[in-house]
């Protein structure tokens, strides 16, 4: 196969087939829709799958801690199950993202770095503070309950909101602010029900995102 | 019904597919010619020819990058190319009497 690298080349091949306007309109619409689907990993189906994952993860933790008096936190078995599901989800999303953005360069690559660095630092910061709280003698209800459940949502939401505002992506900003509201609001439910609220709240948010992506595919 | 109003540079099946595909790429992004070829399934020779015509018209720009895997050309629509596609859409809409509502 020839390599189409030098776009100044003028090989004598031509396929100037005339199109009638209706055919052209259909082709334009179909090609753009197909290209949009191929260039993004953020499909309605993925949002629905993420909604299910959030429901399953937070729901499982809520199920494992309900009825605890005093509160001790999720069992090691549930924590292991959560880590496995989270790791698999991240790998699947990364694979879809890499497939969708293969061959894309420019702003998308810059945004990756701009997003990844503060996000990773913020998440590490949350768990450093988590460790400090445990070290300082705070109860399991605070450390393995309210803090572990709600604070990551607020911190990650705040980072995403800042990035969305800088990119003037108002839908993403609305989603990030909703994440902060759900995270902060859930902390009032106490160390047990905070997990249940986040399971439902996260599921609703991501289902809303799926609906939005169906109704406004150009946002994906 | 006449197609004379339609930009002849775009009103060709292969180039319409190229321009439509590149218009779906985010502003500020480029797409490698190899990925573009995979997406629109044109032969290499055809792609080279049509990209050259669109670049000569100022509708797209090419950028060559050298990395560990060799050199790679990436292309993107220029503002002029995006404008031409917008005008092409409007002409199509005029010709079709508003039956087709462009997005």
Image (cartoon, coloured by chain):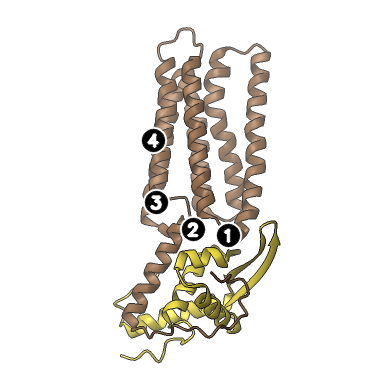
Chain colours: A brown, B yellow
Q: Could you say which quadrant of the image residue A135 lies in?
A: top right
User: Which numbered circle lies on residue A39?
Assistant: 2
> Is residue B87 positioned above or below A120 on the image?
below
The chain to which mark 4 is attached is: A
Identify which residue, A175 or A17, lies in the foreground. A17
> Is residue A57 positioned above or below B78 on the image?
above
The chain to which mark 1 is attached is: A
SS at badge 2:
helix
Crowd around label 1: few <14 · some 14–19 · many ≥20 (10 Å): many
The chain to which mark 2 is attached is: A
Q: For the C terminus of chain B, give its image quadrant.
A: bottom left
Residue at image point 43% right, 39% down? A50
> Mark 2 and mark 1: span between their CA atoms?
9 Å
SS at badge 1:
strand
Residue at image point 64% right, 37% down? A120
Mark 3 touches mark 1? (CB < 8 Å): no
Mark 2 touches mark 4? (CB < 8 Å): no
Q: Nearer the viewer, mark 4 or mark 1?
A: 1
Residue A74 appearing in the image: no
Name the residue carrying label 4.
A52
Identify which residue, B83 or A35, lies in the foreground. A35
User: Which numbered circle lies on residue A212?
Assistant: 3
Give the x, y percent position of residue A140.
56, 13
């Amino acid at each position: 196969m020839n390599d189409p690298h030098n776009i100044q080349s003028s090989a004598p091949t031509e396929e100037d087939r005339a199109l009638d306007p209706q055919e052209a309109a259909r082709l334009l619409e179909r090609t753009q829709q197909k290209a949009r689907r191929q260039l993004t990993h953020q499909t309605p189906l993925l949002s629905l799958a993420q909604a299910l994952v959030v429901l399953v993860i937070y729901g499982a933790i809520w199920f494992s801690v309900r009825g605890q008096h005093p509160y001790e936190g999720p069992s090691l078995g549930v924590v292991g199950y959560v880590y496995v599901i989270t790791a698999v989800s991240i790998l699947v999303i990364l694979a879809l993202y890499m497939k969708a953005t293969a061959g894309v360069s420019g702003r998308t690559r810059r945004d990756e770095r701009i997003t990844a660095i503060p996000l990773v630092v913020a998440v590490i910061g949350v768990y450093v503070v988590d460790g400090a709280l445990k070290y300082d003698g705070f109860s399991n209800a605070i450390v393995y309950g309210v803090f572990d459940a709600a604070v990551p949502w607020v911190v990650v939401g705040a980072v995403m909101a800042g990035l969305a505002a800088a990119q003037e992506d108002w839908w993403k900003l609305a989603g990030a602010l909703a994440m902060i509201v759900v995270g902060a609001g859930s902390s009032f439910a106490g160390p047990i029900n905070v997990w249940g609220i986040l399971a439902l709240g996260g599921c609703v948010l991501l289902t809303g995102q799926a609906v939005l992506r169906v109704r406004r595919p150009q946002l994906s | 019904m006449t197609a004379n109003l339609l930009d002849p540079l775009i009103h060709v099946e292969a180039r319409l597919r190229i321009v439509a595909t590149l218009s779906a790429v985010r502003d500020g992004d480029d797409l490698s010619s190899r990925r573009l070829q995979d997406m629109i399934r044109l032969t290499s020779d055809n792609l080279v020819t049509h990209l050259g015509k669109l670049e000569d018209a100022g509708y797209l720009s090419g950028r060559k990058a050298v990395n560990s895997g060799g050199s790679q050309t990436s292309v993107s629509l220029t503002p002029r190319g995006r404008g031409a596609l917008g005008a092409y859409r409007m002409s199509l809409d005029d010709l079709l009497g508003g039956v087709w509502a462009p997005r």
